[in-house]
Amino acid sequence: MARLPQRPAWKALEAHALEMREARIADLFAQDPARAQEFSVAACGLLFDYSKNPLSRQTLRLLVALAEDASLPAQIAAMFEGKRINVTEKRAVLHTALRNRSGRPVLLDGKDVMPDVRAVLSRLRDFSERVRGGIARGYTGRPFADVVNIGIGGSDLGPLMACSALRAYCSPHLRAHFVSNVDGAHLAATLSDLDAETTLFVVSSKTFTTQETLTNGRSAREWLLTRLHPSGTAEAAVQQHFAAVSTNLEATSQFGIAPERVFGFWDWVGGRYSLWSAIGLPIALAIGFDRFDELLAGAYEMDEHFRTAPVERNMPAIAALTGLWHINFLGHPTHAVLPYAQDLAHFPAYLQQLDMESNGKRVDRSGTAVEYATGPVIWGAPGTNGQHAFFQHLHQGTQITPADFIVAAIGTDRMPEHHTILLANCIAQSEALLRGKSADEVRGELRARGIEGDDAERLVAHRTFPGNHPSNTIVLRQLDPRSLGALVALYEHKVFAQGAVWNINSFDQWGVELGKQLANSVLEDLRAGKARSGHDASTARLIDYVLANKEDK
Ligand code: F6P
């Protein structure tokens, strides 16, 4: 089969992009009164409005044709059916099984994975309820008041994001903390306020070999033992204060974690897709298992929508295709995520791993270098704060950054007026990006303030907004477990659908390995007290420089 850029579906979009490059989104609205309705999808409690993008019905037809040419529906089916689509690791990709509530079996090599999934969920329910109910207690008999999750990447970002997003549902009696960075400042700052007698640690690591997590886990263990003075009964203290989530049960037992406190998952759950598995234990502890179950239910609804809706009405597929339009045909390499919800402050960082670790790839599934751009740079911060920081660049910078605005119609706080102001800002920003402000409008405004002539002309260019900047708006009814589940699954499937069209493997992450290897080699040098041969001159000098300046040299 011809390579992607040589295929008629791709070439048709390239030709169409030349026509659309000059299109004004405002004109598209003027020409089509049904546009706002037509270019939006409502499903699973979410509204996805993509009408403020420079695309027409013809653009959409061509994008859908591209998806069909790439066999997107068949690729979706292959994922849900447990085919080994992670070709470089020969693994299936079945995070959807973790939230499957259809009653249908999910077969992997002919064996239904659902009994194992249900068994772990039932153990998570039991353990989280025992901790929350004060039945499972610490070594000295006091109930747990704080849970510290120790993990990094997918073993941190998902639970951290969800606990923060669902702050309104979190128990005030069991506070969740997250330690990820190997910088000791992170663990030290977290532990400084905690009482060892009432602290439960969850060491989360799919592999249980991750340097940062094991280093933090060992230091947390030491902190606990020093404080509890277990006089020869160290094992009992560790067993009561530590739980682990991992696929590597041998390593968790070596760490000293009691088998009944170890919650497993499987190699068919990618790290960045794992918050639905036992990796979600801190979420279940913080919001209660029933709420955790609602999170899974929201994701399942989106799974069913993604699996069954036709491409042109399929929310994740449309999100993927509008993204492709920007990246591959209009040349916009970055994408901003702007949640208008302080509780979603960790959402952009979560999406960075989900999208950039999945689709930051330079070869296709066969290992051939791709001749087109793949995953965008994802960045963002909550509104309204971003408005007072980087929105200047969005409105008047020289690059165009497509953006996703995310907002809930109903606020979770008891300050309704704040939420109305938040909503107004969110809606107004996408309007401003679209509409812009012409030189004549600026002149009129200046005239109304008594500024005319040269004084006015000096300011006109500075105060003009080009507008025509694209955005999507995602509206949740309320930020609750169910809608969060649907929102996260929307982005998971968007990332999958983009990878499917680009013909890349979205489920491996070899690009993180080289840095890990070299860190081990530099670590040996730092411990040995000198840079050995094999480094470039800059690296060798940096090693020597930090050694010369280290305080404990
Ligand atoms: O370094 C990247 C990575 O492998 C991620 O894919 C993963 O989420 C993270 O590290 C943590 O890995 P683990 O859960 O095995 O500790």
Image (tube, rainbow, N blue to C red):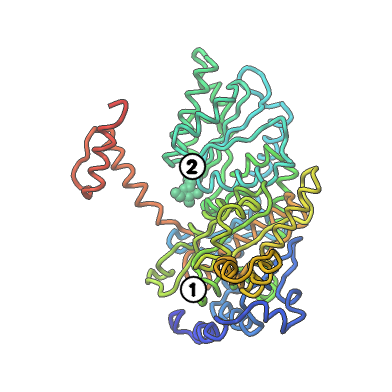
Residue at x 32% of width, y 27% of height: 551
> Looking at the rendering, in which quadrant would you find the C terminus?
top left
Query: In this view of the protein, can residue 303 be seen by the observer?
Result: yes
- Camera-side mark, 2 or 1: 1
Disc 1 marks which amino acid? Gly
From the top left corner, tell me how far across and down residue 272 is, in percent.
54, 52
User: Which of the two discs, 2 and 1, labels the residue nearer the N terminus?
Assistant: 2
From the top left corner, tell me how far across and down residue 484 is, in percent.
69, 53
Q: Is residue 297 toward the left or the right of residue 54 in the image?
A: right
From the top left corner, tell me how far across and down residue 298 is, in percent.
72, 55
Residue 287 figure quarter: top right
Residue at x 23% of width, y 44% of height: 540
Residue at x 59% of width, y 25% of height: 194
Where disc 2 sits, the SS reads loop
Residue at x 43% of width, y 80% of height: 3
Identify the residue under disc 2: 248
> Looking at the rendering, in which quadrant would you find the N terminus?
bottom left
Numbered-mark total: 2
From the top left corner, tell me how far across and down residue 129 is, in percent.
72, 34
Q: Identify whether 199 is placed above or below 366.
A: above
Residue 49 figure quarter: bottom right
Which numbered dot is residue 380?
Answer: none
Which numbered dot is residue 331?
Answer: 1
